[in-house]
Image: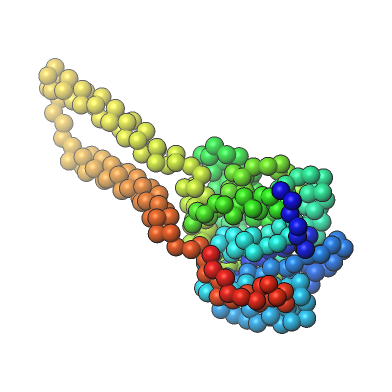
Amino acid sequence: MIHLSAVRYSVVIPVYNEEEVIHETYGRLKNVMDSTGASYELLFVNDGSRDRTAELILGIGEKDPSVTLIQFSRNFGHQVAITAGMDYAKGEAVIVIDADLQDPPELMLEMIAKWKEGYDVVYAKRSERKGESLFKRQTASIFYRVLKRMTEIDIPLDTGDFRLLDRKVCDEMKRLPEKNRYVRGLVSWVGFRQTAVEYVRDERYAGESKYPLKKMLKLSMDGMTSFSSKPLKAAGIMGILIAAAGFIYLLVVLIEKWFTDVTVPGWSSLIALQILFSGCILMFLGVIGEYLGRIYDEVKQRPLYIVSAVYSKKPEDQQVLRR
Ligand code: UDP
Ligand code: MG
């Protein structure tokens, strides 16, 4: 497919209440992108910020036509914001980067170099994470490893969404309409030639993480449920094991009754087992519920996001678009 594009690089930056970092982030991104000597666009996707983030980006956009602001009508979440950025990006290569400078913009040059070597996806692998709590590092590490064991596709360990996608990968991503998105998994699923560059994840430049535990849990559940149906199967396997144990125990009880005179007092053990198994049943109902809820989200066919406005000095962008 011949692709005629006016821009070489699109940088997608999801922002949610990032007023403290916008200027610094813009400065660093601009420096790096200017040094490539090629044309580029900076696509800020404002994911329903309640602070001055939009205002600040608009101010920057007034002076710099490479800046585009995509406004969401409310907070739709990081993964959706990235998706919107990919939908709007026009570049031959699309780079997704966090706004808080935890992902060093300078690494984009290494990614671009790999892309020029012929790779279609260049993801950034964290060799070390600075300034994040032990809890966050540990839970993230465990999550990536569990997910790896549970899925058939190879999702690289310790990578976030900081990555470069070739135009053709980005176009394929647009064909994936699922609602509860785990973007890094989808990129692996799409395939093509993929490679990694390693980096040390810095501390956040300013402000606080916009990923509280609740959002982290949602993301990890999306990762699991989108790429594995093993949790559903686990219920079946556990059921078989418990039924088998129950059957053996039944035999034991019968043998005791017929051939010995042991009487079994056992109210408290009964209750304990009862609670244990009720707990297991509820847990697996919960697992089914997670999948069911996601199926429900798909069936409703709501758009993934709503863009309230696009601000850009490029004339073709001066309209309100919906997906
Ligand atoms: N973000 C977003 N929507 C959200 C939460 C976060 O667009 O609902 C953006 C945020 O502005 C940042 C990126 O996603 O650019 C990563 O968020 P953050 O740095 O807070 O996550 P962490 O690095 O702590 O995991
Ligand atoms: Mg961060």
In percent of width and height, residue 319 lies at 61, 75
Q: Position of residue 118 (x, y in %)?
A: 79, 44
Residue 101, horizontal then vertical, whole percent:
72, 65
Identify the image quadrant of residue 18: bottom right
Q: Which of these two is toward me, 60 or 167?
A: 167
Can you say whether 146 is above or below 222 in the image? above
Vertical relation: 214 (above or below) 285: below
User: What residue sits 40% from the left and 55% below the top?
Assistant: 299
Question: Which residue is at a point 40% across and 37% down the rendered structure image?
Answer: 233
- The spot of residue 74 in percent (x, y) is 51, 73
Residue 131 visible, this orientation: no
Quadrant hosting ligand 1: bottom right
The reply to whether residue 257 is visible in this rendering is yes
Of residues 8 and 13, the one drawn nearer to the viewer in this rendering: 8
- Tell whether 244 sits left or right of 22: left
Left or right side of 316 for 74: left
> In this rendering, would 140 be left or right of 204?
left
Residue at 32% x, 31% y: name it.
Answer: 240
Above or below: residue 318 compared with residue 90:
below
The residue shown at (53%, 39%) is 151
Can you say whether 44 is above or below 196 in the image?
Answer: below
